[in-house]
Image (cartoon, helix red, strand yellow):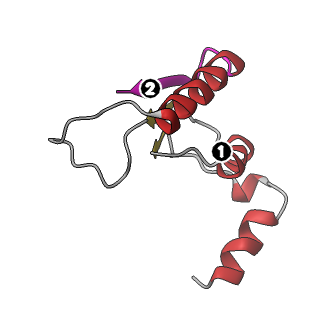
Amino acid sequence: MSPTRIWTEIETEPTEHHLHRCLEVVKFVGNMDFKLLAYFFEHIMVLKTIIVDCRHPSLEPWQEFKENDSSMVLRNHALDLKRQLPPTIEVLICP
């Protein structure tokens, strides 16, 4: 798909035809895109879990994770999100 078509799809008003019925889990690694998250809330009918991985995306799973300022900010945003969402949507925060 071209970038223009993708943005056209995102910017259209949600209709029954545009609602996602299968996407249940969303994972963010190293950052949380709030504009994308807002899109998910408007267009996903069955969202059950949001996973927020505070590690940097380039960090391999076997590498040691050390908390830093940006990961602490991300963790705090995830905790705020968890408090604001209904209990039907689980927010998992990794490391």
Q: Is residue 93 magenta?
A: yes
SS state under label 2: strand
Q: Nearer the viewer, mark 1 or mark 2?
A: 2
- The residue that disc 1 covers is 37
Q: Amino acid at mark 1?
A: Leu
Instruction: Between residue 40 and residue 15, name the one nearer to us.
Output: 40
Quarter of the image that includes the C terminus: top left
SS state under label 1: helix
Q: Residue at x 76, y 74 (%)?
A: 8
First to last magenta residue range:
85-95
Q: How many marks?
A: 2
Q: Residue at x 57, y 35 (%)?
A: 47
x and y, in percent, of residue 1 in the image: 57, 82
Q: Considering only vertical position in the picture, is 67 above or below 38? A: above
Classed neighbour count for the residue bearing mark 1: other residues with Cα under 10 Å, few (<14), some (14–19), many (≥20) = some
Q: CA distance from mark 1 to mark 2?
A: 16 Å
Instruction: Between residue 49 and residue 69, name the one nearer to us.
Output: 69
